[in-house]
Image: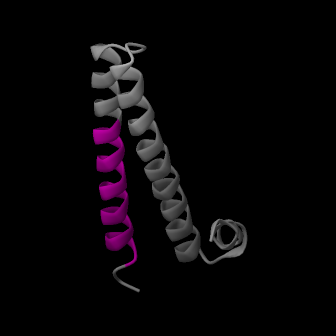
Amino acid sequence: MFGHLLHLVRSGSPRERATAIAVLLSTTGAVVLVVGSFASVAAFYRGVVGNTFMLGWLAFAACWMAFVLLGDEVLTRLFAAE
């Protein structure tokens, strides 16, 4: 899947490029958030990280989700006329 998306980023139409970039960013971010969340919770319970780190991670996750939702909205409005 990633290979196909990277191919579209390089040689697709502008619509395909924008969609492929949005899908790549959101998928990569989702993987980072899922893996990072499990690792952060484990580190928190072992006493490796504190409350400040967990609050920062939560803020990062909320901002990333907002970015993904806004990106989907922008793509929908941008290509709705086609």
Q: Nearer the viewer, residue 1 or 17?
A: 1
The quarter of the picture where residue 79 lies is bottom left
The quarter of the picture where residue 16 lies is bottom right
- Span colored in magenta: 61-79
Give the residue furthest to the bottom: 82
Q: Quadrant of the C terminus?
A: bottom left
Q: Nearer the viewer, residue 1 or 12?
A: 1
Report the residue at 40% width, 38% height from top: 38
Report the residue at 35% width, 64% height from top: 72
Confirm whether the magenta stretch covers residue 71.
yes
Q: Nearer the viewer, residue 66 or 51?
A: 51
Magenta stretch, overall SS: helix
Q: Is residue 15 left or right of residue 55?
A: right
Q: Quadrant of the N terminus?
A: bottom right
Q: Is residue 69 above or below residue 76?
A: above
Q: Position of residue 25 (x, y in %)?
A: 51, 54
Q: Position of residue 29 (x, y in %)?
A: 47, 48
